[in-house]
Image: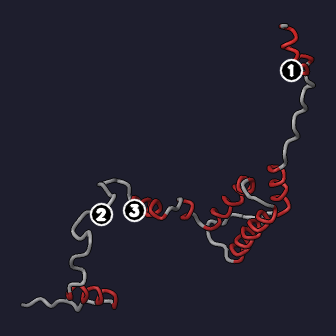
Amino acid sequence: MARMTEPRFESVVDRQIRLAAERGEFDDLPGAGKPLPNWGGQDDELWWIKDYLRREGLTSEAMLPTSLRLAREVERLPERVRAMLSEQVVREAVADLNERIAAYAHTPSPPYVAVKPVDPDDAVAHWRAAHEQPPAPPEDPPSAAQRRGWRGLLRRRG
C-alpha cells in the first residue's frame, strides 16, 4: 500500500527562498560553504551578538531595557555634565533626557524601574561647581635674597 504524504504548507517567504535557490541566485555567494567568521568554535552562545556590538561600535548598554538604560543615564549625568562646554549645552542634554524619561513613563515596559526626571538647575549647579576656577594660592612674599636677584649675588662675591 502506498503511503500518502501530507501536503506541505509553504509560506510566501519560504516559497520565494525556494524559487530563488532553484534559479541559482544563492550560488557563488561570498563565504558560501565556509565557517562563520570570528566564531572559532567558541562555546559562547552569544558570540555573534558580541561580534555585532563590536563591529557596530556599540556597548552592551544598547541591549538594556529602556528603564535600565534611562536609570543608568541619570546616574552618569553628573560625570557627563563636567565635560560639557556651556550651561546651555547642559540644559539641552537634561531636556533631551527628561523627554525620553517622559516618553517611557507614558508607556512603561518591564522591568519597571522608577526613573524620575532630572532637575536642570541641579545639573547646571554640578556643571558650575566643576568649572569654577579654584582661587590661586597666595604667593609668599619674596625673601631678601630673591629681591636682590643677580645683583645681590654679584655684590657678595666682589
| Residue 146 horizontal side relative to residue 31, left or right | right
The answer to which quarter of the image holds residue 103 is bottom right
Query: At 24% from the left edge and 80% from the top edge, which residue is drawn?
Result: 26
Query: At 75% from the left edge and 53% from the top edge, which residue is drawn?
Result: 82
The numbered mark, 1 or 2, whose residue comes first in the sequence reads 2
**Quarter that holds the N terminus:** bottom left
- How many labels sit on residues? 3
List the single residue furthest toward the front. 158
Q: Nearer the viewer, mark 1 or mark 2?
A: 1
- From the viewer's perspective, is residue 145 above or below residue 103? above
Q: Residue 110, percent across and down?
A: 61, 68
Q: Residue 2, percent across and down?
A: 8, 90
| Neighbourhood count class around disc 1 (C-alpha, 10 Å): few under 14, some 14–19, many 20 upward | few
The numbered mark, 2 or 3, whose residue comes first in the sequence reads 2
Q: Which residue is mark 2?
A: 36
Q: Amino acid at mark 2?
A: Leu
Secondary structure of the residue carrying tag 1 is helix
Q: Residue 17, percent across and down?
A: 28, 85
| Neighbourhood count class around disc 3 (C-alpha, 10 Å): few under 14, some 14–19, many 20 upward | some
| Residue 136 horizontal side relative to residue 107, left or right | right
Q: Which residue is mark 1?
A: 149
Q: Which residue is mark 3?
A: 48
Q: Are marks 2 and 3 in contact (CB under 8 Å)?
A: yes
Nearer to me, 153 or 137: 153
| Neighbourhood count class around disc 2 (C-alpha, 10 Å): few under 14, some 14–19, many 20 upward | few
Q: Nearer the viewer, mark 3 or mark 1?
A: 1
The answer to which quarter of the image holds residue 112 is bottom right
Estimate the spatial distance between the alpha carbons at disc 2 and disc 3, rounded to whole Å.
9 Å
Q: Amino acid at mark 1?
A: Gly
Q: Amino acid at mark 3?
A: Trp
